[in-house]
Image (cartoon, rainbow, N blue to C red):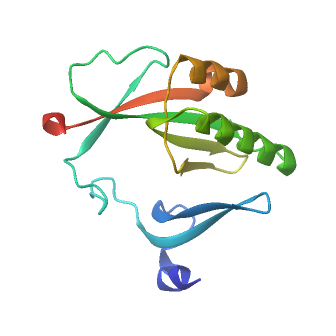
Amino acid sequence: PRVYEETKDLWQEGNILRVVGKIRLRDDQIQLSCDRAQQYDPEARTETAATPRQTTVPTAIGTPPMNHTPVSRRRLLIGIRQTSDEANDTAFLHKLVDTLKDFPGQDGVRLRVTSEEKIIHLELPGLTNYCPELRQRLLEMVGEDSLTLEIITGNNGQ
């Protein structure tokens, strides 16, 4: 409520915002607690980015990156659909998160949740290790068209 009061003018349809907060699971409900909100500026660096500007290079899922730029990290993008069956969606999300937790590692995960009205991008807390076994399990859950592996590189190998 405090953040909303301070940023009321930003919360207009059509605005793209950068929101920093926490995602919690409480009583089988996903809640977003907003700590900060600002107008999204793709050119602005975030205060958490201590390294030079990063670039994202999508690669075919399952193929190793074929560039010579030093790789800082990888991020797995997973697309899922929100349906009218909230209980089933929640159970599926739990299963997906549990699957990712079975493979701890250094790869980030971002969900692209598509509903009838909008697309929401969620950065999942925690890291996973994208490997052939995880890939196979995710393919069975979401299909190949819903998986993308991004290679995130920094300038000068950072």
Tell me: residue 148, above or below residue 23: above
**Residue 85 in the image, given as x and y percentages of width and height:** 87, 46
In the displayed structure image, the side of residue 79 where residue 141 appears, left or right: right
Q: Residue at point 21% right, 25% down?
A: 69
Tell me: residue 113, above or below residue 149: below
**Residue 23 in the image, given as x and y percentages of width and height:** 60, 60
Q: Quadrant of the C terminus?
A: top left
The number of callouts visible is 0
Tell me: residue 72, above or below residue 33: above
Which quarter of the picture shows residue 74?
top left
Q: Quadrant of the N terminus?
A: bottom right
Camera-side residue of 100 and 87:
100
Q: Residue furthest left?
A: 156
Camera-side residue of 114 and 107:
107
In the displayed structure image, the side of residue 155 where residue 106 appears, left or right: right
**Residue 37 in the image, given as x and y percentages of width and height:** 45, 70
In the displayed structure image, the side of residue 135 where residue 88 appears, left or right: right
Q: Residue at point 64% right, 61% down?
A: 24
Q: Residue at point 59% right, 69% down?
A: 33
Tell me: residue 25, above or below residue 38: above
Which quarter of the picture shows residue 66?
top left
Q: Residue at point 56% right, 27% down?
A: 147
**Residue 149 in the image, given as x and y percentages of width and height:** 46, 27
